[in-house]
Amino acid sequence: MSGPVQNPEKYEWAVDIEDLLFRYGHGPEALRHINLRIRPGERVALIGPNGAGKSTLLMHLNGVLRGTGRVRICGMDVSNGFLPQIRSLVGLVFQDPDDQLFCPTVFEDIAFGPMNLGYSKEEVLERVYRSLCQVGLEQHQDSSAYHLSGGEKKRVALATVLVLDPEILALDEPSANIDPKHRRRLLNWLSAFPKTQILATHDLDFALEICERCVLLNAGGIVADGPSREILYDKDLLEANDLELPFCLQGAPGEGKAVS
Ligand SMILES: Nc1ncnc2c1ncn2[C@@H]1O[C@H](COP(=O)(O)OP(=O)(O)O)[C@@H](O)[C@H]1O
Ligand SMILES: [Mg+2]
């Protein structure tokens, strides 16, 4: 069976969101008039304090949540008719891996997606092994995810999405709970992954290293959207939004710790 349904050359925007508004039940607006366009191949960090709406926004990219306004993925409206295509285009890793993993073994969790898409047995095996290697969990394919640590579970959740080679990777707190060695491995891998990436993260060093663009959310609205080298260097802006400069920029004045 094929992979992505469309050639990325054929559409201008990987993500095109117009005036998106969403509330949970009768609660306050969790997303307020979001307008956001992301080009194919762009790497965008979604940052903001707790409760800003980062996870809520990511969940609109593949129709897990639906608000008012318009969300288009690779030129297709996120609507019932396109949901299967949209879900094969957008690989969404939830903030909490327990929301993603439900099979008895790690292997089955990762194989679930490609098997459902009808890939051959050989291709499923090859893809599962490749993604296990990408997250460094080759030794754990027969384990139950429930017996793994939080960081290991997070890496299994990542593998369940990487295995499908999606056009758009939407990762919610990808480096949370991951040890430095595997964080670095993930950073290297994402840096080399040529497709669109949207990373909701509190790890601003991670954002600075991989993402050329940064979207700052607060209270459900976009507060700033621009080059990471402007937004992530702007101490006042970050502090006004309950964030801090990335650690690599917090050295004593004159120490020259900023990335060149
Ligand atoms: N399942 C839910 N039910 C009700 N309110 C929710 C739910 N999930 C999130 N919210 C609310 O929506 C807002 C945005 O949350 P969220 O998208 O999780 O923020 P972030 O990921 O930036 O921390 C918060 O005010 C949060 O309390
Ligand atoms: Mg969140």
Image (cartoon, rainbow, N blue to C red):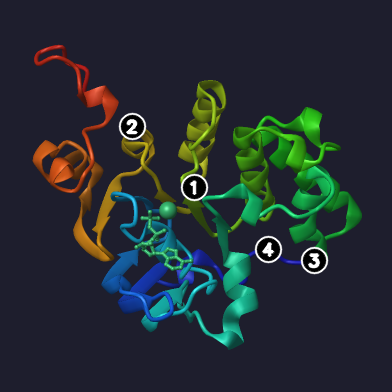
> Which is nearer the N-term, disc 1 or disc 2?
1
Q: Secondary structure at mark 1?
A: loop
Residue carrying label 2: 205
Amino acid on which disc 3 is placed: Asn
- How far apart marks 1 and 2 lie (CA) works out to 20 Å
- How far apart marks 4 and 2 lie (CA) works out to 32 Å
What is the x, y in percent for residue 108? 83, 50
Residue carrying label 3: 116
> Which is nearer the N-term, disc 4 or disc 2?
4
Q: Secondary structure at mark 4?
A: loop
Amino acid on which disc 4 is placed: Gly
> Which is nearer the N-term, disc 3 or disc 2?
3
**In the displayed structure image, the side of residue 151 where residue 251 appears, left or right:** left
The residue mark sitting in front, 4 or 2, is: 2
Identity of the residue furthest to the top in this view: 255
- How far apart marks 3 and 2 lie (CA) works out to 36 Å
Q: In which quadrant will I find the C terminus?
A: top left
Q: Residue at x 56, y 50 (%)?
A: 96
- The one of 90 and 150 positioned closer to us in this rendering: 150
Q: Mark 3–mark 2 contact, CB under 8 Å?
A: no
Amino acid on which disc 1 is placed: Pro
Residue carrying label 1: 194
Q: Secondary structure at mark 2?
A: helix
Amino acid on which disc 2 is placed: Asp
Please say whether residue 260 is visible from this viewpoint: no
Residue carrying label 4: 3
Q: Residue at x 21, y 44 (%)?
A: 242
Category of crowding for the residue at label 1, using alpha-carbon neighbours closer than 10 angstroms: few (below 14), some (14–19), many (at least 20): some
